[in-house]
Amino acid sequence: MLSIAAVALSVSLLITVSSLFTGFINAFEQSAVQAIGEIVLTPPVKLAKYPQFIEQLKQIRSVKAATATLSAQGLLHLGKGNVKAVKIWGIEPGPRAEVTGFKQALLNQKDSNAPPTFQTPDLGEKIGGFIGIGVIAAPDEKTDEYDFEEAKKMTGQKMVLTTGTAAETEEEGKTQFRRKLVRFIVADIAFTGVYELDKSYVYLPIERLQEKLYPDELLPVADQIQIKLADDADTDVAMAQIWGAWQMFASDQLNWGPGLISSTDIDTAKQMQSQYVAELRKQMWILLVIFGVVSLSVILLVFCIFYMIVRLKQKDIAIIRSCGAPGTSLAWAFLGFGGCVGIAGSALGTAMGYAVTRNINTVEEWIRIIFGLKLWKSSVYMFSIIPNEVNWWWAFAIVLFSIVAAALGALVPAIVAAQTRPVKILRYE
Amino acid sequence: MYKLILPFRYLLKRHISYLAFVAVALCVFIVVVVMTVMRGLVTDFKQKNHRFVGDCVVGTDSLVGFAYYEDFVKVLEQQDFVHAVSPVVKSYGLINASGSKQNFGIEVMGINAACHSKVTAFTEMLYHTKDDPTRAFTPGNDPNLIGCIVGIDRWLSRDPNGIYKYESYRRRTKLAISCFPLTPKGALEKAGAGMVNTKTFYYTDTLHSGLARVDSSVIMLPLEQLQLLCGMASSVKRISSLYIKFKDDVRLETGRDKVAALWRDFVKEKADEKYAYLFKTVTVQTWKENRRTFIAAMEKEQTMLIAMFGLVGLTTVFVVFVVFYMIISHKSKDIGILKSVGVSNANLIQIYLVFAFFIGILGSAVGSLLGWRFLVNINSIENWLYGKFGFQMWDRTIYAIGDIPSHIEFKILIVIIVSAIIACLLGAIVPTWQAARLKPVESLQVNQL
Amino acid sequence: MTKDDCILKTEGLCKSYRMGAARVEVLKGVDLTIRKGEFVAIIGASGSGKSTLLHILGTLDRQDEGAVKFEGQDLSRLSAAKLNKFRNKTVGFVFQFYHLLDELNVLENVFLPAMASRSILGWLGCRTWAKNRAKQLLERLSLADRAKHKPYELSGGERQRVAIGRALMNEPKLLLADEPTGNLDSGTGNAILSVFEELNKAGQTIVMVTHDERIANKAGRIITLVDGKIKHRDKQTQVQ
């Protein structure tokens, strides 16, 4: 029982660590995907005729949906004397919801069946916009939580956004600014759970934003195309196909030269986070090595337990040997016992690891209470909860390793048992 | 006396106890090293934030700022719990280096260098003018030129060890900085006239706060200059924040509450003033509250690590439990013997708890010693690993840290050692208790050979 | 036999053990009286309950029914602390398999009972006395030159003599020996019995359990245990 418990503890520790870290990394990568889609195409200059390009993209089997964004910066007037610097995204809410999890971020529309829209019933010709919750509200000082009901009351409010364009002039250091006022009605409040987005983003209809910023542009323009792939799509294949489509479109439709085309960045959202994710993976490996070393002491324990069993059962072993049982069969029996301990311990350990991982947020709550640390909510931190899914690939690898380790732990005692000389043990003192 | 002799002899003779000792030493070593490094990083990071903003911030997120701050500064300076106050303007702008056609977005901070040195660790963040921060905005020897301080990551590069390549001389570089001035109501002051105010500044010094966001995007300007650029220098001047430093014996929350009370009174007093409406968005926060979005990530990671080390602690308890279980089941005869000569259950339990204590204290001592040696050399080890394998624990191009923290806090060490000893005692208590409860004859009949 | 002569008395002692699902009755009502200064041998076949009886007399085990009275005092009414004191000061036990502590040397094994009954300060106060007493005992048992040796370095007979020395350390009123020669050859066993005879001549009350009649005949009185009950006889008379 003790040896099973020893293996179980080791396995649960390693599964918990690997699951939490890989969960965190996945959630981090996913948050990027949720915000900007799986693949992001960023040309060096604005691209025109993006609806055509999006249609061409949709012809590719690997592409499920695509949407365009137009970015700007501006000043949002929230009241007399209250002005905040914001980032503006011109978006297509419906296609955007297909590419990202944007719909779930909208407080008013997340539960509706229809695709998200800037149109509110009494909007008329006015511009509707979404506003990040952190722009208009601050989380409670004590609980770090937003008051969502209070925030929703901003729906229907009139907002004034000052934005504009900047153009470099011939004169060194001189920039030509053109101011644009955008009056819009708050159609919804966005709570993505990513603090940076919620604190400083305003979303407007891409066409209306373009009208304001680039009134001379006759064709629709965008800064970026964000793409979602089909569920069964191979990312590398899809990237190659998107590149091909882009090259064709840029040269045929936009008349871009090769230099401009090749300056376009087409990255997966994960690639854009890759540097930071690599650091996280490194830290995960280091922690796994550390806990692996701790687990090693547990494996040594298994060895000691088996050795003790052999010593305790010396008389029994001697009796069995005196009845003619070969040493090798005894050795196999112990090895088999070791393997069984590994299997039983791993099964129990997997269950324990699963329980701890799934309840890590409760554990976090206890730690917060015991150590007086603050429990940060998503309003001020990236995720509202620690990702708590078990990584079954890692769990499988750990279980396999444990079974082998337990069997190895039984190896020396098995050899000792096999080499027991009955007369030495059974001789009366 | 046998309660000391026997545990000591068990420790020396029972080889299985070496396993418990090794497990305790290993766990203590790991916890000491990781806790020291993590705590060092978190404390370091928090300290950097604290040093950047002082103890308390009275401020607004609105780019319009708030007015009548000079009067409130006077109120604060009269308080016995306040050491110094520094008015600060924060805004956004564009920078253009001479010879370049491109503009880059920046954050600008306007400060009074002398005041700011008293409230924050501003002086220590400078390089060329750290001996005399009043000259922070004086480039070279020409007092007519107005200087600016640039975030170090904007100005200098780092080698792979994270060391900045400082220049011994100050490059005389012109920087054109443009801001969008706002009226007290929040409208663009120069809506019809180019929208921006632009002024040329000369590079004076770099700012090394140790905070990645600050060092890569902040430019510091003289307070009055930035007020002019942002349209905050009209008849009633405005600022974004007041950074306050309390006296040494003042508790943070107590100081904040006092400032908040003073502020409420001040707002009431100024209720009829023309720009009183600007007070609506002003908050009073401690530095922790003000910087919480940055601190949150590190504290979250620290919490997760504590959870994981809880599991490590559990493993230690378990290892000790199993070792003691094995020792005691092997030693049940000894327990029977001791009981037969009149040793009480309580004394029996004491023998094994003393044994567990010896294992705990020796294991902790060895683990702590090894941990200390490792930490003393941790940066050399990392440099060697980097030189040999290109491996760095924290990539210095991503993380704004210098050396890995290696100073063991005595209090933390005591907590770890005490926890290890308690873990050993907990691991030993159940098998000991079970064995002590047996009748002497039951203990003696086991393993008579 | 007067009341003052009687050191140990049992009345209707019953004891049973659980062996799997079955319950085995080992003692089925044992009435026994031991006088001061007696050397009594309890003899019986294997499984007759003689060791069980000895363990109950020495409070190493507890009876299911009946009473054990030592100098008139019912031992089952004693608190745990008083029982410990009884085992430490009043009774000395010698086991068949010696049961010495391997971590202590011969001298330490002998003065263990003296250590067991005292705190650290108390021990520091009587340490010299205890060591001297232990040395005296070892001399008497011809083990003076083995004082620093560990038990596993001694022969069986030497170990048993160390066990006797330990049992006598606190000058117990009663010495209980469970098959003291069971693990020894006849020569060594006779030597041990000689020690017992000497001790008894000096006034030590001894109760010894054995399965060997030849060894039992060395005692002053023989008590036979058959199927958990006593059949008295002394050395000269036959079974009644």
Image (cartoon, grey):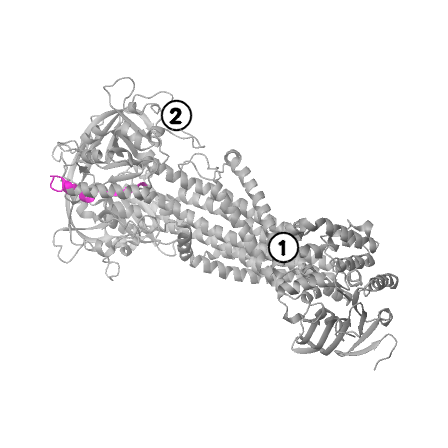
Specify which label sits upstream in the sequence, 1 or 2: 2
> Taking A343 as reference, is B311 above or below it?
above
- Chain letter of the residue carrying label 2: B
Query: Is-magenta flag for residue C24?
Result: no
Q: Residue at x 65, y 77 (%)?
A: C21
Q: Quadrant of the C terminus of chain A?
A: bottom right
Identify the residue under disc 1: B351
Q: Quadrant of residue B138?
A: top left
Q: Nearer the viewer, residue A418 or B184?
A: B184
- Chain letter of the residue carrying label 1: B
Q: Nearer the viewer, residue B310 or A207?
A: B310
Q: Nearer the viewer, residue A134 or B21?
A: B21
Q: Please tell me the numbered disc located at residue A293.
A: none
Q: Residue B299 location in percent, x, y?
A: 39, 46
Can residue B328 be seen in this snapshot?
A: yes
Identify the residue under disc 2: B166
Disc 1 marks which amino acid? Ile
Tell me the SS state at disc 1.
Answer: helix
Q: Which residues are magenta?
A: B269-287
Q: Residue B335 location in percent, x, y?
A: 67, 60
Tell me the SS state at disc 2.
Answer: loop
Q: Residue B315 location in percent, x, y?
A: 54, 54
Q: How many marks?
A: 2
Of all residues, the one furthest to the bottom in this rendering is: C240
> Taking A31 as reference, is C181 above or below it?
below
